[in-house]
Structures are given as C-alpha cells and as structure tokens.
Image: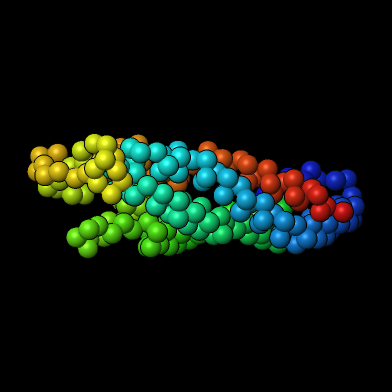
Amino acid sequence: MKFYIDPPSTPIVKKLIVDDLMLQLNVARVASDNEMNNRAKKLTKKIIKDCDFIRALKRDELRGSFGLPPGGYNAAIDSIVNETSSDTYIYSRPLKIVGNTISGGWVLAIGSDLFEKMKNMSTVIQDTEKGAKLPWLRWTLERGNSIIITNFRVKFQIGKGRSGFAHMIPNAVIGYRVPPQFAGTDHDNWFTKAIIPRLDEYSDIILKTLDKYAP
C-alpha cells in the first residue's frame, strides 16, 4: 500500500502529520492481523468450495474420468478445501516513509508449496484393483493436455468401473488425458482460475479490517 503526500507548507507540520499517520496505521496493522487472516481463510474456503472443479467432482462425468467411487470424493473435497484454506495468509510489513511515499503494506500468500502438499494427499490418489496408484489431482495441476495413459481411454457406461459410471478400455490411438476444462499446469490450473478473479475480495478484506481497527 502506498500513499502520496503533498508537500505541506511547513516541514514541521509535515513531520508531525506523517509521524501520527504512521503510528495509527501501524497500530491498526498489528491489531487487525488475526481477524484479517481469519477472514482471508474463510474467503479461500468459500472460493474453492464453489469453484467449477470442486462442483464437477460431485458429478458423475468427472468422477468417472478419475475412477472415483460413489461417495469417495467427499474426503478428497474436504482435504482440498481445508488445505487451501489453512494455508492462506496475509502478511503485513511495517509502514514507513520513503521519500514522498509510504512503503510497506500487505502481501497475500496461499502456500508457497501448496500444490505439492495437495498433490501428495492420500485422499486424492486413487488405488486401482491392480494395486496401481492414480494421482488424479496431480494430473490436473501439472500435466496439462498431455496424454497420461497411452494404451487406454475412458468409456462412459453406467454400472461400470469403480465410479459406477465409466471404465478404461484398450485404445492405443486416443489414450487418456485429463478432461480439457480441468487440465492445468503449475501456473495455470483450476485453482489459479478460481482465485485470481477474486483477488479484489482479499484487498477488500484488508481495507475493511484495517479501517475497523484504525484509531
């Protein structure tokens, strides 16, 4: 956050005004920290719970594509939502005068290694009948549109497979890849698509919470 200060007529007045402003802002910054972070975590939980990917996990088509058994997706959704929420932080830096501006401010951080944590959660790795492990969440976060399984493809058919909605059949021509609407990479995926358009809401949390604690 930066404030531009018009040069006042008296240097002494300028210093008094600025010193008082810095004191008030830094007091409010420290006092608002806990509430600001709690509100940010709740917002992240809401955004992820309502995002297209999580909604799709509750429907037959995507569950069939990943081979998730009926009801088995609930634990996966809870893990994803809780991990992203608990790993949401707003860090503040002390405000101070640098030239004619006030430097410092707030930084939103949603887990520096969040994707690695999510990719390795047991609830998002599906075990097959043959003992293989299918890290389906990892695929959505890093494999993009690349073919993941070369010799099989998904055939949607009611009553088939672990999901009861689809199963894999041999097909060396098509292969299997993540459904395109949820195929992503580390920097462009269902998570970033959900969070980035809502960044203004985090800014709103910062401003409103800071205003609440301002003297």
- Tell me the quarter of the image containing the C terminus: bottom right
**Residue 11 appears in the figure:** no
Report the front residue among 187 and 177. Answer: 177
Quarter of the figure with residue 47: top right
Quick one: 117 or 155, which is closer to the camera?
155
Residue under the image location 71 percent in, 59 percent down: 33
User: Residue 179: which quarter of the image?
Assistant: top left
Relative image position of residue 104 (x, y in whole percent) = 67, 57
Residue shown at 12% from the left, 47% from the top: 151
Q: Is residue 139 left or right of residue 175?
A: right
Q: Quadrant of residue 204?
A: top right
Most extreme residue toward the left, as rendered? Answer: 172
> In front: 82, or 182?
82
Residue at image point 81% right, 49% down: 212
Residue 95 position, x and y percent, is 72, 58
Q: Is residue 3 left or right of residue 24?
A: left
* 209 vs 112: above or below: above
Q: How many marks?
A: 0
Residue 62 position, x and y percent, is: 34, 41
Which is nearer the eye, 4 or 213?
Answer: 213
